Image: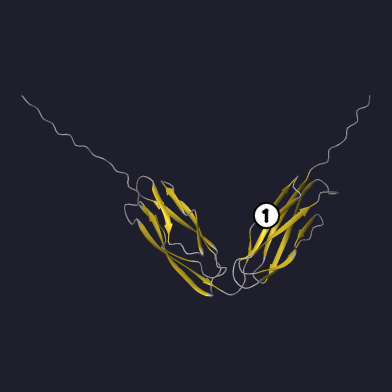
Amino acid sequence: GDQSASLTVTIFIEEPIISVASRTIQFGTTIEETDFVIGNIGQGDLDWHFEDMPVWLKAAPSTGKTGVDATTVTLSVERAGQAEGEISSIIKLVSNSRQEPAIELTISASITSAPRLSVGSTQLEFGEDLAQLSFEIANSNNATLDWTLEENSDWMVVEPSEGSLGTGEAAVIGATVTRVGLRAGIYEDEISISSNGGQASVVAQMRVAQAAELVVTPE
């Protein structure tokens, strides 16, 4: 006779679920950047991006894909040009998450009228061959930043050695080294930066190779 059977089919649909540790980020008066972690506690890839970003806030990266491993986003505030006082904004973290596809994050920072010294690189590696390198200093806040540089070695020259920077302005500092007359070895010096917006230092390192010896073979 006729026979019938039933078959149960189970389909698993991968659904990402977003996870964030904090929804309020406060930069205060001195913090310039902070890490923000985006996690995925579901299945499949979580595609996400930020929306409604104010001009004074940057995210790196600003869009991405998160799987099993969490993604760390660096949020940075640019205070230069902003009016003195408190600034705040609500941004959106939009994703394909099954739960909370749009999360609101409250970001705030304090703006003062004082200048702030920022240094692009704190290390200069000349190695055995390089003679010139440069680094950048900037005024990452308001008012005028007056700065001076000082280095104590006789094998390196840094210029310019002083100056002033307005709101958001930057200057490129050139460092030149010479290896003439120096013994083989590693040389290190610290470039000190003093200003009315903070202090900083840049470490310069140079290597002098062992001079080749002339070997004369008698005939």
Helix, strand or loop status at disc 1: strand
Q: Which colour scheme is used?
A: secondary structure
Number of marks present in the image shown: 1
Query: Is 19 on the left-hand or right-hand side of 218?
Result: left
| Front one among 10 and 86 | 86
Q: Residue furthest right?
A: 219
Query: Is 181 on the left-hand or right-hand side of 174?
Result: right
Taking 67 as reference, is 168 above or below it?
A: below
Quarter of the image for the N terminus: give it.
top left
Query: Which residue, given by chain and number where applicable, does mark 1 sit on?
Result: 123
Horizontal and vertical percent position of residue 210: 81, 41
Query: Is 87 on the left-hand or right-hand side of 130?
Result: left
Horizontal and vertical percent position of residue 98: 32, 52
Query: Which quadrant of the view contains residue 14?
Result: top left
Q: What residue type is labelled 1?
A: Gln
Quarter of the image for the C terminus: give it.
top right
Q: Residue at x 72, y 67 (%)?
A: 163
Q: Residue at x 70, y 55 (%)?
A: 134
Q: Which residue lies furthest to the left in this view?
A: 1
Horizontal and vertical percent position of residue 33: 53, 61
Query: Is 179 on the left-hand or right-hand side of 13?
Result: right
Query: Which quadrant of the view contains residue 79?
Result: bottom right
Task: Mark 1: give few (<14), some (14-19) or many (20+) Cα within 10 Å.
Answer: some
Horizontal and vertical percent position of residue 189: 75, 56
